[in-house]
Amino acid sequence: MVDALRNAWKVLKPGGHLVDVRPVAAYRPSIAIRRGRKRLAVGPIRRDPDLDVMAASRASRQVLREGIFTKTHAETVRWTASHADLSDVESTLADSESWHLPAATRRRIARIWQPGDRIEIGRRLTLTVLRRRER
């Protein structure tokens, strides 16, 4: 990841910006059912540490220490993914090795979900804007 950021530095014009959006390294995602205007909290999703996300965080800190970028903006944002049903959630989670739906949470969804409901997964992302500096 450090190499990718250094390569981005090479192609950006002086003063050019790079936007880095990635998951927060450590947080507990939540899952809820949206029924009209009501939001019913269901429970947690287990999220194992993601080595790639942690490496990206270290890489960002490294290039800032090197002085090739300055941080012009940083914030943590919440993003909610909406799913039609439990099979859609399971299909999405199957694409990730680090996300797991606990059996108790799965059973609770199956028990309270009704046709027309949406299943929401809350995620937290970091959004950082880096500005290219001259060395």
Image (tube, rainbow, N blue to C red):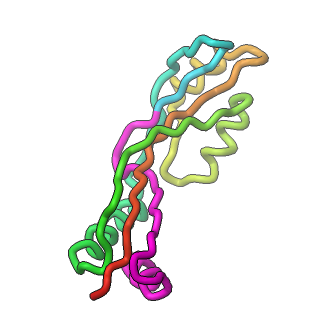
Up-down relation of residue 78 to residue 120 (above or below): below
Instruction: Name the one closer to the observer, 37 or 91.
Output: 37
Q: Position of residue 72 (x, y in %)?
A: 33, 61
Point out the residue furthest to the front here.
15
- 14 inside magenta stretch: yes
**Residue for point 65% across, 45% down:** 92
Q: Quadrant of residue 10?
A: bottom left
The picture places residue 57, in percent across and down from the top left corner, at 33, 63
Residue range (magenta): 1-29
Viewer-nearest residue: 32 or 133: 133
Q: Residue at x 58, y 26 (%)?
A: 106
> Image height check: is 63 above or below 26?
below
**In which quadrant of the rendered image does the N terminus lie?**
bottom left
Most foreground residue, 116 or 60: 60
Place of residue 63 in the rendered image (x, y in percent of width and height, measured from the top left)? 30, 76
Left or right of 98: which side holds 70?
left
